[in-house]
Image: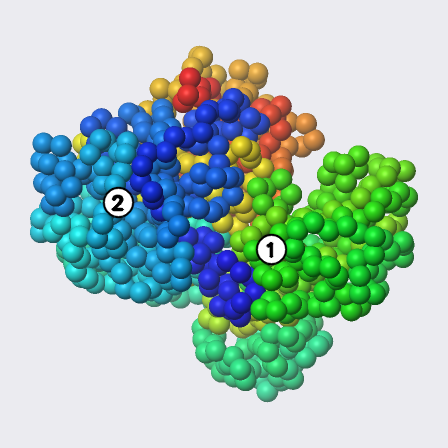
Amino acid sequence: MSSGRVSRHARIRMIAAVATVCALSATPLAPQAVAADTSSHSETYRPQFHFTPDKNWMNDPNGLVYFKGEYHLFYQYNPGGNSWGDMSWGHAVSKDLVHWKELPLALSHDDNEMVFSGSAVVDRDNTTGFGTKKNPAMVAIYTSAYKNGGKQAQSLAYSTDRGRTWTKYQGNPVIDIGSKDFRDPKVQWYAPTKSWLMTVSMSAEHKVRFYSSKNLKDWKLQSEFGPAGATGGVWECPDLFPLAVDGDKKKIKWVLVVNINPGGIAGGSAAQYFVGDFDGKKFTADDKGTYTPPTGMVMQDFEGSDFGTWTTTGTAFGQAPAAGAVAGQGTVDGFDGKGLANSFHSGDATTGTLTSPSFTVDSKYLNFKVGGGRHPHVDGTVMEQGDPPAGTVLADFEGGTYGDWTTTGDAFGTAPATGTLNNQQEVSGFLGDGLVNSYLDGDPTTGTLTSPEFTIDKNYVNFLVGGGNHPAGSDNPTAIELLVDGKAVRSATGSDGEALNWASWDVKDLAGKKAQIKIVDDNRGGWGHLNVDHIMLSDTQAQPVSQETSVNLIVDGKVVQSATGSNSETLDWASFDMRSYAGKQAQIQIVDMNTAGWGHLLADRFTAADTAAKSVVQRADWADYGKDYYAAVSWEGAPDGKRYMIGWMNNWDYSGAVPTTPWRGAQSIPREMTLRTVDGRVRLTSRPVDSVTSLRHKRPATAAGVTVTNTSKTLIGPAAQGKALDIEATFSLKDAARFGLKVRTGAGGEETVIGYDTTTQELYVDRTHSGAVDFNSTFPGVQTAPLKAKNGKVRLRILVDWSSVEVFGGSGEAVITDQIFPDPASQGVQIFAENGSVKLDQAVVRHLDSYRD
């Protein structure tokens, strides 16, 4: 989509609704052959026991149905490349949910529509007339994403040869409400009323609708559910199914899965669920009661007539606390009392800080409410843009021409831009009067701009860059590249924002080399342009300027913890863990350095407490607490009434930048879902499908009765090393604060840490040092999931693949799925304990084969 023809607030909503859409594809419905298998399936990060297509982009699982001995996995697929676009339904089948065979493209995009996510059923009673009772049709119910106008409606296609070829229903669409945010139908047979039941998302309204039909063609609206739970992003890919509680078939509850992006528990994309009852027409979620935050000492509640001892810079926060919304702002709610800090004074364009006096840390947690823009703090940024570092300017794009730079295509025009172009959002952060701006005639234009040759004679190449986030190496980049001998040796891209900011390349190792700068715009889609200015050689690295809207905790002059808003005017609880700063001097600083859309922050009620406050997101229920489990939906018609679920193992925050080729996107391991009573509450739990064991080979490596104190040590030895492992481990708690396993360990400190924190009672995965993590700022980090030890023990099941870890804690109530991109040589497994000892009762490590073997 264009980055420029709508307001920032509207564009954010549209990106959430379009760029993250949960299942799109259109169809000239003749079978289309998949390109010849040119992959070795042994590429550096190729999953061995998770499904991936031979090549090209894949996202959401679709059309999950069991029929005639086959589990069908359809999926969002771009038949033309390794980035999102031209959404269609790819197709694979399996007899055991582990060994997959990729089939030809099922439903293809066409000139009128893309085929977004949906489901499939077997029409055994031939209610549609598409088949016969003897040979029932498989019917796909998908979202038609119309290219003209962007409307989304629900449509049908059918197959009478076990899903190998498809015909689109001539009466499409079968439900059309005129909406651009109406998608991802999940359909099932509802026996009590002998009718079909559709669960479908009103994504921007955070609602799920339920429709019924006797023939899949004529639908009647029954009810709506929502908003509820987490609503920080669009709701997509809903699913509804019944499960017995604790195996008691007389006690049935219904589970409504609602995938959300962004606003998930680990940031970005995630699979939320609700447990409740369904009467054939309406879903009613179980009442979880009201939330009471922890009590403590209030440090600042903004109830006074001024900021008291807190100090301000800039103009964004005004002279005193706000009483709610200020001029030009939407309704602000969720704050306590009458006042709050609000940096929207004079709109998003203003900046400033609000800083507390220094205080001694004497509590375990600092709880507070925060709202406003989602612009996180980035380490290494400075608050003010000073003069550029001293050096040699290669190009400042002043003077009205490109000089001796050469252009191709039509994106860059014949001369530098002088700022914002027609229909573009405001461009800022450039120096002087000119810059490179490839938004000429909008995002669809493409081209290159290349400098003359120069000699690298300083330590850094500094430049200002903004625009689209499409890295070099992706199918359609928007990137600035450093060429040596005609090859790109460095590159950078924008961050999907029109504000330019400093970026740098360390080129010490290229001293004396001849080089060129090449600016590439090869992208015709949303944010398909780049802004560049002031390219220079310098011995000093330029420091990027802060563009954050954040609450920061400052200790010893450094930001040690930070929280930001969620692009919402509703404040919610957040918490800083202060335990490691006990006795130190600290300050709270509320920062608004952003001048674009949602460039403001709201904050209230800073409270020192012994218990962490929990946000709405933390209080919601999640099928997985990792960064990489989205669009999760379940199979219909599985044998023995089993409920199996699978999710796209990726996150829209960085899905287009993960370093894989010639494919991009993987599916999680399919999971058997159950409802269990955990700590007095019914929870959705999961475990890997039993058939994973069919991939095990070699004799298992085992260890038992090992006590570890304040160290990391190799587990078992070489027999336990590997890139594709199935690990089961049980620990007995002693006095260690943290303990667990490290996998994919190797040279240079590479490791993926899978641990348990006894203080917070949380399972966690730390992929900060898991290998390639620098392709997106949101990728490295730590994911946590609540998990209580049972009888003093913690049980873990860990699946390690060439580019992922899936961790199942306890009885499957705590699950964390994360992609990792380690060096292939990093294959070690270690046990560790911090601040005390832990006993490993037993560990069993099994090697897993490829499902293709």
Quarter-of-image position of residue 109: top left
Residue at point 41%, 52% (across, down): 21
Any part of residue 28 in sight: yes
| Amino acid marked by disc 1 | Thr
Question: What secondary structure is found at the residue carrying circle 1?
Answer: loop
Residue on which the image places disc 2: 168
Q: Foreground: 398 or 602?
A: 398
- Image: 517 above or below 590: above
Quarter-of-image position of residue 632: top left
Q: Could you say which disc has been placed on residue 445 in the image?
A: 1
Residue 485 position within the rendered picture, expressed as x and y whole percent measured from the top left? 80, 34
Residue at point 13%, 50% (across, down): 215
| Amino acid marked by disc 2 | Lys
Which residue ends up furthest to the bottom in the rendered image?
Answer: 305
Residue 774 position within the rendered picture, expressed as x and y whole percent measured from the top left? 64, 43
Q: CA distance from mark 1 to mark 2?
A: 33 Å
Residue 372 position within the rendered picture, expressed as x and y whole percent measured from the top left? 53, 69
Badge 1 local density, few (<14 within 10 Å), some, or many (20+)?
many
- Image: 696 above or below 752: above
Which comes before the other along the chain, label 1 or label 2? 2
Residue 561 position within the rendered picture, expressed as x and y whole percent measured from the top left? 62, 57
Q: Foreground: 198 or 281?
A: 198
Any part of residue 618 in sight: no
